[in-house]
Image (tube, rainbow, N blue to C red):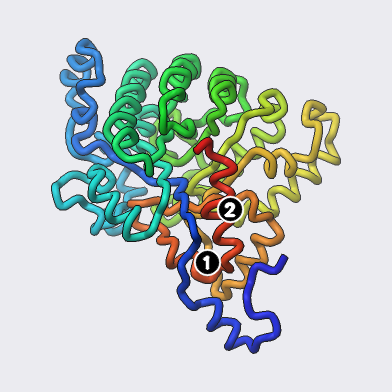
Amino acid sequence: MQYWKGAGMSATAATTELLRPKKVAVEVIDSDVHLLAKDGIRTVWEYIPVAWQERFAAKGVGLRNSAVGVSAKTMRFTHPTGAGIRADAVSPAGGPPGSDRAFVTRQLLEDWDVDIAIVNAIDSAAYAAALAGPDEATVICEAYNRYFVEEWIAADSRYRYLLTANPQDPVAAATEIRRAGRQDGVVGVFLPPTNVLFGNRYYNPIWEAASDLGLPVWTHVTGIEYVHQGSALPAGGFPESYAERRTITAQIAESNVASLAFSGVLERYPDLKVCFSEFGFTWLLSMLWRMDDTWRACRRDTPWVRKPPSEYVHDRIRFTTQPLDEPADPRQLLRLIDMLGADLLLFSSDYPHWDNDNPHHVLNTWPQELRDQVCGANPRAFWPL
């Protein structure tokens, strides 16, 4: 199918048609919206047992208004302007972007015509991945999960929540999935990436719990990658700047996609679905070709993989659109999507980060059929809405 307009037009007329702004879709489901607790761990204090409150208070970390409670990045990977988030997303009532439900509702849902926002607690995920110890992370994840379900999800049905699972303790994470995953408005599991690839049997308790409850597993960087012990690592060596780091972040997704495809996880858990968010997707086409070619040539190496890896990916793995790679000629991106398969894509804004994607802007070169599929039909088929 041709996903670009202008067949039979002159090049100038076709480009004019492509760049004309249009309403993106009848329905927009945003699969990546970040929420923050206004005052760090203090915000979720009532959901933390007293003994753990005393522990956190004595340590004195994570109790202030901050993106992840403590300084998570080195100077090397700090955004060059110091602003990794939109300045205009700061709540008029105070607090970091993503912490004021009324303001997020107005700025995201109403101004951008977003019908459903799949939200996540990015700071709890950073603690879970590496910033807190294993037991501390379990307590923090449960507290954040309880807070956001009660304060956001229960208050507005347009918000759906991805519960944070602690990757440092898969058994405890599975227990939390079975507890929080049955609550109304919870549609998935946020599993932050670490230096253990997803195909490792270490994660089996998480895959089993998520599959049993019919919850997709969603993964996303937390800002601590390449910095803290236990976090996901780059290939080849460490980057030297924010620009390098942002450019190569897709390596985390590439490694984990290959790990899931060749390890047999998707064969052992036939109901498991996984989404990779904020890694882009334009790198995926050549990777699917290489995985299938390798699978055919080396069948004895992974006999438990019963069909080409690309089939597992199309059946069970999805990728969000942000950050959307935009070539000078918009038709090139649409041709790539045509070859890759639009069934793999879910729209995401990445609100309120500095490079977030407004659907009315980034999708205005896409034909209506494709916008409807990526913004509405695909997420409705993937998430248990």
Q: Which sits in the foreground, 290 or 173? A: 173
Could you say whether the residue bearing mark 2 is in a helix, strand or loop? Answer: loop
- Name the residue at 24% across, 58% down: 88
Which of the 4 quarters of the picture holds residue 303? Answer: top right
Measured as percent of width and height from the top left, residue 329 is found at 58, 75
Q: Is residue 320 visible?
A: yes
x%, y% of residue 223? 38, 42
Tell me if 84 is positioned left or right of 231 in this view: left
At x 66%, y 25%, the residue is 269
Q: Secondary structure at mark 1?
A: loop
Q: Position of residue 324 (x, y in %)?
A: 50, 59
Report the front residue among 278 and 119.
119
Residue nearest the viewer, comparing 9 with 319: 9
Res 326 label? 1
Note whether 177 is above or below 25 in the view shown: above
| Residue 235 in view | no
The quarter of the picture where residue 159 lies is top left
Find disc 2 in the rendering and name its residue. 281
Locate residue 311 relative to residue 85 in the image: left or right: right
Place residue 307 in its image quadrant: top right
**Precedes in sequence: disc 1 or disc 2:** 2
Residue, x 23% and y 44% (percent of image)? 100
Q: Where 252 sits versus 47, above or below?
A: below
Q: Amino acid at mark 2?
A: Phe
Percent of width and height locating residue 99 = 25, 42
Q: Foreground residue, 229 or 102?
A: 102
Measure the C-alpha gap from mark 1 to mark 2: 12 Å
Q: Residue furthest top?
A: 51
Residue type beneath disc 1: Glu
Q: Residue at x 16, y 18 (%)?
A: 58
